[in-house]
């Protein structure tokens, strides 16, 4: 005689599985569900958390516009590539339809691209740019970001304009040379390398005499930047005309150090950043930060969603998003100073 089980016994394993699967990549009955796994290199990074918030916001809008369910799962790599690789494995095992990767180590992209290709899942990198050879490994590997060189040129342009308008106002020791310190982002990050190079090149190519007093990495972080700056203030007392910071958090760290060393807004060096984060915009309004360059977090999130939309529709991605070399979706940077601040607040 056949053994008979009550229905609840049969459903138990299914219910258990549903509980074990994270919401983002589970299976939903009824309306179409799109599962998107988003791997972040470090969720507490100010700029990255802004991109992530924009992605979540836009995903909700997309759900309403398309009458679908979009399960967006965020994973924090906490600065470890092997943790992030495990997270990507999990996304793929759980049936994600698309993965978005803010890769920890730019040189490790090939591993992730090969995994995504084997699962036939499109992969959209953002903010931390893999090398072209890696992106070329697979048709459905893309990059959304902004050109670091442009940020460097625009940041240099803010300083150049100020120097050309009134060099004496910047030149703390009156020697006719622009002395600067450079607070750099993570070593090896395209934005750290290129912003550093092109900010200075923008000055030298116009014949402005510059002297580098010091440079060091502060890994994009406000606290580390404040420490470096405190040391430099002691070492180069009264000599620092300009502080170039590869991002706003580090620029704010430099301001923290100057203020705790007893300076006031009028006696601060000319400090510039990149990103246009809300606290940086507030500092521009106060006059402690002389300028920044908007890194378009909302625009980058929008492009990512446009690519996802094309995958959902099954239409050619080039019809939805303008791509360079079939791979790169670029967002422009924009200069922000006290003169045009209102447009960004
Ligand atoms: C941003 C930094 C951020 C970094 C993370 C850069 O584009 O300007 O603020 O820390 O990306 O990868």
Image (cartoon, helix red, strand yellow):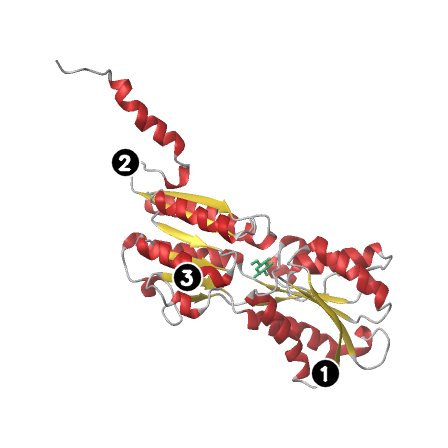
Q: Quadrant of the N terminus?
A: top left
Question: Mark 3 and 2 residues: CB-CB less than 8 Å, in contact?
Answer: no
Asked if residue 140 is positioned above or below residue 196 in the image, the reply reads above
Most foreground residue, 264 or 204:
204
Residue 61 point in image, percent of width and height:
42, 46
Task: Give the mark toward the camera: 3 or 1.
Answer: 3
Q: Position of residue 250 (x, y in %)?
A: 69, 59
Q: Residues within 10 Å of mark 2 (few under 14, many from 20)?
A: few
Ligand 1 sits in quadrant: bottom right
Identify the residue shown where x is 81% and y is 61%. Answer: 231
Compared across the picture, whether 96 is left or right of 79 comes to: left
Dot 2 falls on a residue whose secondary structure is: loop
Instruction: First in sequence, mark 3 or 2: give its number.
Output: 2
Q: Mark 3 sits on what residue?
A: 110
Under circle 1, the secondary element is loop
- Using the rendered view, name the quadrant where residue 192 is placed: bottom right
Residue topped by disc 1: 208
Residue 52 vs residue 86, the one in the foreground: 86
Instruction: Give coordinates of residue 99: x percent, y percent.
Output: 40, 52
Taking the spot 85% from the left edge, 63% from the top edge, the residue there is 234
Of 332 and 24, which appears nearest the observer? 24
């Amino acid at each position: 005689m056949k053994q008979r089980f009550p229905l609840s016994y049969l459903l138990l394993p299914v219910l258990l599985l549903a509980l074990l699967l994270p919401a983002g990549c589970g299976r939903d009955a009824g309306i179409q569900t799109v599962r998107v796994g988003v791997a972040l290199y470090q969720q507490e990074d100010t700029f990255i958390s802004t991109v992530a918030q924009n992605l979540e916001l836009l995903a909700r809008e997309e759900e309403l516009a398309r009458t679908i369910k979009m399960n967006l799962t965020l994973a924090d790599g906490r600065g470890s590539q092997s943790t992030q690789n495990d997270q990507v494995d999990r996304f793929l095992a759980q049936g994600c339809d698309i993965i978005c990767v803010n890769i920890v180590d730019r040189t490790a992209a090939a591993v992730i691209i090969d995994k995504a290709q084997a699962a036939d899942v499109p992969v959209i990198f953002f903010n931390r740019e893999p090398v072209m050879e890696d992106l070329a490994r697979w048709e459905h590997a893309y990059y959304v970001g902004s050109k670091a060189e442009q940020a460097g040129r625009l940041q240099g342009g803010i300083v150049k304009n100020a120097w050309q308008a009134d060099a004496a106002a910047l030149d703390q020791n009156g020697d006719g040379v622009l002395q600067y310190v450079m607070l750099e982002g993570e070593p090896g990050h395209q934005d750290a390398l290129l912003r550093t190079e092109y900010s200075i090149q923008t000055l030298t190519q116009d014949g402005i005499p510059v002297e580098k007093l010091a440079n060091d990495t502060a890994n994009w972080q406000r606290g580390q930047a404040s420490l470096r700056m405190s040391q430099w203030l002691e070492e180069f007392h009264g000599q620092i005309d300009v502080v170039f910071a590869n991002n706003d958090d580090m620029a704010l760290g430099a301001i923290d150090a100057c203020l705790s060393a007893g300076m006031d807004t009028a006696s601060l060096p000319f400090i510039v950043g990149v990103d246009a984060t809300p606290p940086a915009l507030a500092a521009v309004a106060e006059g402690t930060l002389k300028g920044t360059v908007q890194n378009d977090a909302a625009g980058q999130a929008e492009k990512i969603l446009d690519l996802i939309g094309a995958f959902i529709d099954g239409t050619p991605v080039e019809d939805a998003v303008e791509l360079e070399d079939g791979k790169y979706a670029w967002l422009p940077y924009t200069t922000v100073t006290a003169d045009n601040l209102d447009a960004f607040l």
